[in-house]
Image (cartoon, coloured by chain):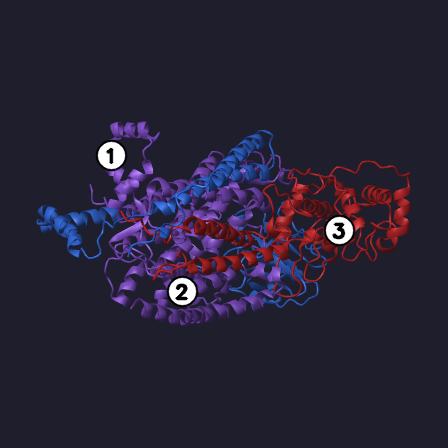
Chain colours: A purple, B red, C blue
Amino acid sequence: MTKNRDHDLEHSLGKSFGARKSPLRPAARWLDTNLGGSGLLRDELRHIFPDSWAFFLGEIALYCFIILVATGIFLALFFQASDAQVIYTGSYAPLHGTEMSVAYDSVVSLSIDVRAGLLVRQIHHWAALVFVAALVIHMIRMFVTAAYRRPRRINWLLGVSLLLLVGMNGLFGYSLPDDLLSGTGLRIAFSITESIPFVGPALATLLFGGDFPSQGLIARVYPVHIFLLPAVIGGLLGAHLGLLWLQRHTQFPGPRRSDRVIVGTPMVPAYALRTTGYLLIVGGVCTAFAAFIQINPVWLYGPYRPWDATTAAQPDWYMGWLEGAVRMMPGWDIQIGGLLIPAIFWPAVILPGLIFTPLFLVPWIDWATTREGAFHNVLMLPGQHPVRVAIAAGFITFLTVLLVAGGNDVFAFVYGLSQPHLLVVLQYLTVLLPPVVALLTYVLLRGRARRWATTVR
Amino acid sequence: MLCDRRRGAPRPAGALVVLVVLLVACALAAASVAAASPAPSATPQAASATPAGSGSFTPAATPKPLASTTYAPGTGGRVFAENCSGCHGAKGEGYVGPPLAPAGFASLVSGMVKQGGVNMPPFGGVLSSQDIDAVAEYVSQELADPASHQARTPQGGELFRLYCSGCHSSTGSGGAMPVGRNAPNIRKYPPAEALAAMILGPGNMPALAGNAFDVRQQTSIALYVQVLAPDPPSPGGRGLGYLGPVPEGAVGAVALFLLILVAVWLAWRSRKAVPREP
Amino acid sequence: MSPEPQDQGRPAHVTTWPVGLGILACVGGAVAFAVSFFVDASNAWLGGSLALAFLGLGLALAFWGRDLADDEVITGRYPVPPDDLEGQAKLATQLDEHASVITRRSFLSKALIFGVAVFALSQVVLLGALGPWPGDSLTTTGWRKGRRLVTEDGQPIDSKTALATGGFIVAFPEGGEDKANSQVVLLHFVNGDFVPQQGRESWSPDDFVAYSRVCTHAGCPVAEYLDEAQKLVCPCHQSEFDLLHGAKVIGGPASRPLPQLPLAVDAQGYLVAQSDFTEDVGPGFWYAS
């Protein structure tokens, strides 16, 4: 297995270990004797990672996942996924004697009575928010640098699937405490499922376990959140990282770098040190936020009762675009004889399909438009392809307007605006702003790209 | 030499764009938080028997009565006759000011007297604290409806989430209304103001006292507002205006921004480095 | 082009003090965390010390790795060469070659695929075990003829005294059947400005009106009552309903008005329902009426 050997490799190896015997030698020998396959591991010790800040974005997501699993294990030891009603007798006095589900009771107890319980809960929630944000930025980076080109098309599919699954898992996760805010979200989820033509009502009662609010809903969501989706995510993530390992990471153009020659830092020791450090830094930032900034104070929201309501009712940020679409869609029901298609079906079911389907198909849309199907290991610089960046900018603008619309009552309240007027403005912006931004991006980058092209020649 | 920009070598322009976008998001987040955070109350809720608004999250189910202070018997009645009966009636039955039937807890009364309400002047600088305590005891024991003494904070919380939080949010932060004045942040006012509002029904707010709530229920709601004001119990840290996931998401962007900064720093030197020739 | 020695960046000399400081912070933070835990310190202390420990160790490793990084830059080969399309095609041909012993038997292989497909599809029926079919759960509520309106704590509502000066009450059917979908908002139009919808003149005795409180948009309770504007607004997506004119939609994304519950007054003067709602409550679905 010498295909990765190179002069540089030998030289660097000799230089790293130096003349002095490394204290790792006995450990390495133990591995050799007990594990074998040392040839394969030897090569992978110096596995090369090209360098750029942009390549750390996926790591933010990966390390958030690790933090979520670790904190999630702690939380799972305390959470009780039951809808059975119980009277609260814990130490948070304003809830004394209030009837609530066992699930809500367990989360309040975890937050108030268990040492470090609130800290772990908050790390878990902050890490979830950062996780999806990192995934989105990571995906944008992939898109504008055309990292999805062959032979990485399948990895792109895995990545988009991961984004979808992680978003869903987050939704299920924050619904587990059965508090007023997340319970309201589940009611809306039921209504959305119900709105699907023909299969909607049946799908809703089958999946939720009955008409809303159903007995055992939290108990049903729980294994999906802690087992099913994390297992699928873990599996897809393993494949995603495995492909990355086998194919090696892409690199930006630069000195000595080409589609054949990879230039970067080796796994041991430089990259391993930095990436482990980064894992701890991601953990540290999430912990720092959890230490000083409160998130999801469920004891203030109260237990979910279907006749309670609160204003400033939003899902977590990564579902905000859906919330905004649902708020902005006018009530255009379609009634054909006895068949009703409620208006909410379009923004809540069709729109996500319209957003994710092209996302999945990006590598093939790219091939269809550029007719360029060669294998690439070198990335494109965003500025080299203004159309792609313009499309990304327009798409992001569209989703951002939806996101802002999802919180329009909060923004109206905080900034002293009229909420209905703000909504109308956002409705117009949804349609008008994305093409304007895309056009502007294209125009700004086009000149740059032209200058680049002439310099290269 | 190091400043030579190699042809095609990536510059941190991409990083700059992302950082600027996130910086704008963080600035918006900070502005939202600053705008939404309630102004600190002019006078602290000193008369509340709960541990003074330090964010303690184990307030008592009902506030304990005020410790007896050194005032002569009859002080409360005298102070009331001189200062309060002009607006509230000789027996607190209401006149220009609302009736005092639900004012069954001294801590509710003293807070209101000190700070003043929307339509009520503050007496904190006019009366001594002993006089205020005396009149608070007098009103809560002599004038308030005895049913109000049965009020309990948790029941107030349940009623609050059924009738009030739809407009004022579950944390009392307020909410946008499509017409007229927004439902205000109720934590800015002394908790007894909630009683006045329930009785008077200002603006688009319905007069629920008497229509939907008996006296005990009105007082319970005020007791729950007392838990939320001036800041709800927040053992987890800063509340970000208690407006739910919107400011939380905006602040989460700050975390991502910081992590990207670290990534730029981590990869800075090696991103353009050239391997040594053998 | 041969790179200048300066191209290597700084020499691989690891500055000790950031790494040392980081480790110190890690140790300090870890000890502080343990102490905070045992004295039951606040979340800020627990989290702050833990964050310090994480960040300290992380930055120590990061500083060290970063200093090594630019001296450690090496080259290698990508395993998937860009132009080796024939090499890539080998997978397809080899697979075809080895599997041909099966695919050669075309009838049997097709039958096998058919069998597997039918088996897989048949497992879809397990969905039916997950929960009940809708039945009439989406089209009925807990209201029946003569059933009293009660408050959340079970008190019946006296038409002679309730809502004397306006306001609203959240009401449920006595007995609490299907409480969530049966919840209504009871109003009393003391000013006499309520306009009954056609055919519903007998539904509002003494100008008491009850509307379903389940929003016809996405099912949230329509909890915001605007007294002067006489509107109900839903806090979830800000749908607005005109209370004086049959709770029809006057703003926001809802499309169908809130169903009205036919009311009557029983012999003792309490408010009761005349029957269940005559329309489906809550959000729409394909066979809703």
**Left or right, residue A228 beside residue B224:** left
Residue nearest the observer in this picture, A440 or A22: A22
> Can residue C125 be seen in this snapshot?
no
Check disc 1 and report the residue beneath it. Answer: A38
* Dot 2 alpha-carbon crowd within 10 angstroms: few under 14, some 14 to 19, many 20 or more: few
Q: Give the foreground label among 3 and 1.
A: 1
Image x and y of residue B12, in percent: 42, 58
* SS category of the residue bearing label 3: loop
Question: With respect to residue B111, does C165 lie above or below?
Answer: below
Instruction: Mark 2 or mark 1: name the one nearer the start of the chain.
Output: 1
Mark 3 closeness class: few <14, some 14–19, many ≥20 residues within 10 Å: few
Q: Residue furthest front?
A: C5
Q: Are marks 2 and 1 in contact (CB under 8 Å)?
A: no
Are discs 2 and 1 located on one and the same chain?
Answer: yes
The mark lying in front, picked from 3 and 2, is: 3
Count of marks placed on residues: 3
Q: Is residue A370 above or below residue B195?
A: below
Residue position for label 2: A338
Residue A120 position in % (x across, y down):
51, 39
Judge by depth and name the residue closer to the eye, A273 or A417: A273
Left or right of residue A129, residue C119 in this image: left
